[in-house]
Amino acid sequence: MPSIHNTLNLGLIGCGLFAEYHLRAFKHLPQVKVHAVFDIDHERARKLAQIHHIEHVCNSLEELCQLEDLDAIDVLTPEHAHREPVIHALQAGKHVFVEKPMASNYEDC
């Protein structure tokens, strides 16, 4: 559910090429605000946030998932690295969008 302000506050995990594609699409959705980003390469996350005017650059996956004002998390890591961020986001009570394929093997699904 979007926040009480009718805006979906979104966090991005993974700030590579797919993040750029998603951010371009989100610019056409006025009800979506990308509020925070995290990447294991902190400098890449910082640059992406600066270019796209994103408020929070998180220092860890856990920090991003625990932001209370996030409604959902967009997981844009490589497929072999989907499991951990998806589990953290779900355990934090967030809605999750995960890039395809969902995982590399049945166990991770």
Image: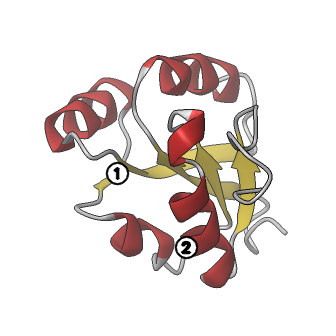
Q: Crowding near pointer 1: few (<14 within 10 Å), some, many (20+)?
A: few
Mark 2 and mark 1 lie on one chain; the one further toward the N terminus is 1
Distance in Å between CA atoms under marks 2 and 1: 21 Å
Q: Residue furthest left?
A: 43
Q: How many marks?
A: 2
Location of residue 3 with respect to 46 vertically, above or below: below
| Residue 89 position (above or below residue 96) | below
- Contact, CB < 8 Å: mark 2 with mark 1? no
**Label 2, on which residue?**
88
For image coordinates 68% across by 74% down, the residue present is 90
Q: Percent position (x, y) of residue 88? A: 55, 73
- Which amino acid type is marked by label 2? His
- Kind of residue at badge 1: Glu
Closest to the observer, 85 or 72: 85
Left or right: residue 104 compared with residue 42: right
The extreme right residue here reads: 1
Report the quarter where the C terminus lies. Answer: bottom right
Say few, some or many: other residues with alpha carbon within 10 Å of mark 2 (under 14 / 14 to 19 / 20 or more).
some
User: Which residue lies under the disc numbered 1?
Assistant: 55
Residue at image position (29%, 60%) is: 58
Rendering coords of residue 84 (x, y %): 52, 63
Residue 74: image x %, image y %? 63, 47
- Quarter placement of the N terminus: bottom right
